[in-house]
């Protein structure tokens, strides 16, 4: 017969049982605290959240789920997710995700579903789900997060439609500008020819004041030519349609001299000095296979920038070197060099640099981009060189590349 435990042993066992009971109560309380904490976190989440068991029945859902989908807890908890809200969650895409994808993976993310709900209408939702282990590590649960992106998708759709309308309008405006810029050149050519004949006295003698007026008008027509050609170039650059035919020209007579004539009044008003010491362009013919209009756009832009950024009283120099297979030219101004942080983006589209007052310059930021495109189409290259006091743009053009 076994010995009866002594009083001291009984007291020790009772103490052990009491300690175990206290530890168990503490563990239960800790678990309850953890659950309450988790439930509080879930309730603060703005997205609807649902916890499902391994049979896809609803264990719990947060307030956002009940509010968003207008269902009651008693109509939701312990029911199959497909039965919730009078079977409005019986969505084929959701069935596929929960019954086919989740069993093969621990989660799925960013699955977009569209559905017409009886209570709330058409909705676009992004679903995220993850498999979780229960407290006993045997029961599996699925946490399903639902993000309502209906308004966002509707806004994106409107934005795409608006963008398409704006694009169509832009293309129409660009086409119109290109047509106008092109068509206006023919009457300008006629006016220019008539004024040239008048200035030469072909139609008879004119008083000095009348002749001066004709000469002034001739200069204005030349400048208007420049505006039309510049407009043509910039609209083509925006449209991404820089294309042209070439023929043999004289670089000086057909390109540089007309551009300098267009800008002569502006340079005179700005007290700008022209200095050819960097390598004067020779007076004899300089043959080049090029497009007159587009190459004039190049030099018009380079000389206009030299005037703008050189400032009043600056010196502008242009030079020329014949390297056999190609010409090397440059346009220099004695203004402040372009800031170093801007130089990498000089020839990019829509980039503009500040003037002397550091304000962003006027214009579309297409001039140098268009210049590089045109030079490239002619088989040449262009780059920027900062000088101790000034800016120098250097370009190359092949002699006669077709």
Image (cartoon, grey):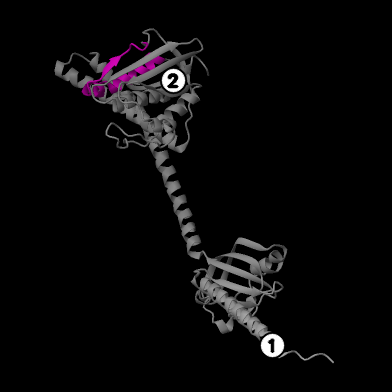
Label 1 sits on residue: 8
Q: Relative to the observer, which residue lies in front, 268 or 25?
A: 25
Residue at x-position 60% and y-position 64% = 128
Q: Residue, x 48% and y 61% (percent of image)?
A: 152
Q: What element carries label 2?
A: strand
**251 relative position to 99: left or right:** left
Q: Give the image location of residue 53, x and y in percent.
A: 66, 75
Circle 1 — which element? Answer: helix
Taking the magenta stretch, the answer to whether it contains residue 276 is yes
Is 24 placed left or right of 322 in the picture? Answer: right
Q: Residue 350 carries which label?
A: none
What percent of the width, then of the height, locates residue 328? 44, 15
Q: Is residue 104 above or below residue 33?
A: above
Q: Name the residue under label 2.
A: 395
Report how far apart the C-alphas of labels 2 and 1 lie in the structure: 106 Å
Work out whether residue 166 can be spotted.
yes
Count the labels in the image. 2
Residue 388: where, in percent of width, then height? 34, 20
The correct choice, above or below, for 274 with respect to 36 in the image is: above
Q: Nearer the viewer, mark 2 or mark 1?
A: 1
**Res. 294 image quadrant:** top left
Relative to the observer, which residue lies in front, 261 or 347? 347
* Residue extent of the magenta highlight: 251-279
Give the crowd class for mark 2: few <14, some 14-19, many >=20 residues within 10 Å: some
Q: How crowded is mark 1: few (under 14 residues within 10 Å), some or many (20 or more)?
A: few
Q: Which of the two residues, 119 or 187, is positioned nearer the viewer here?
A: 119
Q: Main secondary structure of the magenta part?
A: helix
């Amino acid at each position: 017969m076994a010995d009866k435990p002594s009083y001291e042993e009984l007291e020790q066992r009772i103490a052990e049982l009491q300690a175990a009971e206290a530890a168990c109560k503490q563990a239960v309380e800790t678990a309850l605290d953890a659950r309450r904490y988790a439930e509080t976190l879930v309730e603060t989440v703005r997205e609807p959240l649902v916890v499902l068991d391994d049979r896809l029945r609803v264990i719990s859902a947060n307030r956002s789920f009940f509010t968003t989908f207008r269902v009651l807890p008693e109509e939701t908890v312990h029911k199959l997710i497909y039965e919730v809200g009078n079977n409005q969650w019986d969505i084929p895409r959701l069935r596929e995700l929960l019954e086919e994808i989740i069993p093969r993976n621990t989660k799925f993310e960013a699955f977009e579903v569209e559905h017409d709900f009886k209570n709330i209408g058409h909705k676009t939702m992004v679903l995220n789900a993850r498999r979780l282990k229960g407290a006993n590590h045997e029961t599996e649960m699925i946490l399903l997060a639902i993000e309502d992106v209906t308004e966002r998708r509707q806004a994106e759709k409107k934005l795409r439609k608006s963008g398409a309308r704006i694009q169509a309008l832009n293309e129409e405006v660009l086409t119109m500008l290109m047509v106008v810029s092109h068509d206006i050149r023919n009457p300008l050519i006629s006016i220019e020819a008539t004024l040239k004949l008048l200035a030469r006295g072909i139609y008879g003698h004119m008083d000095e004041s009348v002749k001066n007026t004709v000469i002034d008008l001739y200069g204005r027509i030349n400048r208007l030519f420049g505006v039309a050609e510049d407009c043509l170039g910039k609209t083509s650059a925006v449209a991404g349609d820089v294309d042209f035919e070439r023929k043999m020209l004289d670089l000086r007579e057909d390109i540089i001299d007309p551009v300098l004539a267009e800008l002569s009044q502006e340079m005179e008003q700005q007290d700008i000095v022209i200095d050819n010491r960097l390598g004067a362009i020779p007076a004899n013919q300089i043959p080049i296979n090029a497009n007159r209009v587009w190459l004039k756009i190049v030099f018009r832009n380079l000389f206009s920038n030299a005037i703008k950024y050189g400032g009043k009283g600056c010196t502008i120099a242009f030079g020329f070197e014949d390297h056999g297979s190609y010409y090397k030219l440059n346009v220099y101004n004695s203004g402040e060099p372009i800031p170093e942080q801007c130089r990498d983006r000089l020839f990019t589209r829509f980039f503009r640099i500040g003037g002397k007052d550091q304000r962003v310059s006027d214009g579309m930021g297409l001039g140098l981009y268009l210049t590089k495109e045109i030079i490239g189409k002619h088989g040449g290259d262009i780059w920027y060189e900062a000088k101790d006091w000034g800016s120098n743009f250097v370009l190359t053009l092949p002699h006669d590349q077709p």
